[in-house]
Amino acid sequence: MPRSDTLRPLIGVNADVRDNNGIDFIGTGLKYVTAVIQGAGGIPVMVPTLGDVEAGGELHVDDLVDRLDGLVLTGGRSNVEPHNYGGEPFRPETLRDPMRDATTLPLSRKAIANGLPIFGICRGIQEINVALGGTLHPYLWELEGVNDHRMPQTDVMANRFALRHPVNLTADGLFAAIARNAGIEGHEVMVNSLHGQGLDRIADGLQVEAISDDGVVEGVSMPGSTSFVAAVQWHAEYNVGNHPFNRALFEAFGHAARRRAAARAGADVA
């Protein structure tokens, strides 16, 4: 009988709707796919953004969750629309992706309810919070005392995703435990910053795991979940092999996904 540490879990990576010369495409960033392989040891599969309808009928969220061993909710240029959490409408220039909202919000709820390991990144942390009843700040940089966390205006990827500020890990939280297990000393790690929205009211059941030096919530987990539920506001997927804490987060997520894969396959759990 195979052991769980020899299995490669099937991990869904959600997508955006993207315009390419007037034609809509569904796509996701290569760096997320790479991080699933290198950081979590999984087999990535793209989860299409289809809203509540697919080519023959309703989107079968239950079937999708049953067949996956883990789910990564990615970042994106668009923002979660405020009507999903009772907020004021967006300004006209704000990027949005209603089909993604209609896909990821019910998918997040179903994944959590069914014990599917889930790791949210940037927009992903916002989706998890909204899916569970939390709210967002749509224009974070306009809040008094808050730094501008938006993406640096540069085409040089290394500069765009450069480390910009520290986050403090909650003592005795999941992130602090992951850091200790990875041999990372202290409760502060440096992260990048590429977001305009931010978490406002934290959904019931979520625990704050990381806070930036200006008070922005940068990480959450769900202690009452039957599996791994965690999310970060920064882009943990970027160059994951060279950031010890980001790598440790993906490894913890990958371990949870392997445990689910083992249970599905009837394998021994390592």
Image (cartoon, helix red, strand yellow):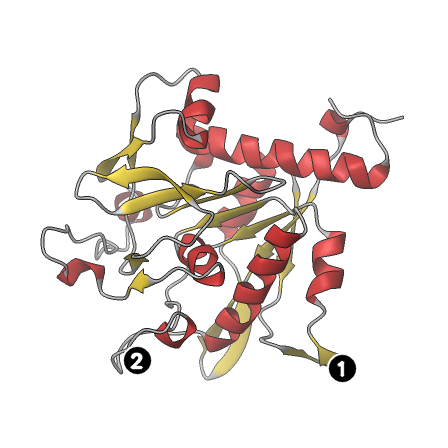
Residue 215 position by quadrant:
top left
The span from disc 2 to disc 1 (Cα, nearest Å) is 32 Å
Residues at discs 2 and 1 in contact (Cβ within 8 Å): no
Q: Where residue 190 appears, x then y in whole percent?
A: 28, 32
Q: Residues within 10 Å of mark 1 (few under 14, many from 20)?
A: few
**Quadrant of the rendering where the N terminus is positioned:** top right
Q: Residue at x 75, y 54 (%)?
A: 66
Q: Residue at x 29, y 57 (%)?
A: 200
Tell me which amino acid carries mark 1.
Answer: Gly
238 relative to 36 in the view: left or right: left
Foreground residue, 134 or 75? 134
Q: Which residue is mark 2?
A: 89
Q: Where residue 254 appears, x then y in whole percent?
A: 61, 35
Tell me which amino acid carries mark 2.
Answer: Pro
Q: Is residue 231 in view?
A: yes
Q: Where residue 35 appears, x then y in whole percent?
A: 52, 41
> Where is 162 relative to 198, above or below?
above
Dot 1: what SS? loop
Dot 2: what SS? loop
11 relative to 136 in the view: left or right: right
Q: Is residue 41 in view?
A: no
Mark 2 or mark 1: which comes first in sequence? 1
Residue 161 position by quadrant:
top left
56 relative to 107 in the view: left or right: right
Q: Which residue is mark 1?
A: 56
Q: Residue at x 66, y 46 (%)?
A: 115
> Where is 235 relative to 139, above or below?
above
Q: Residue at x 51, y 82 (%)?
A: 23
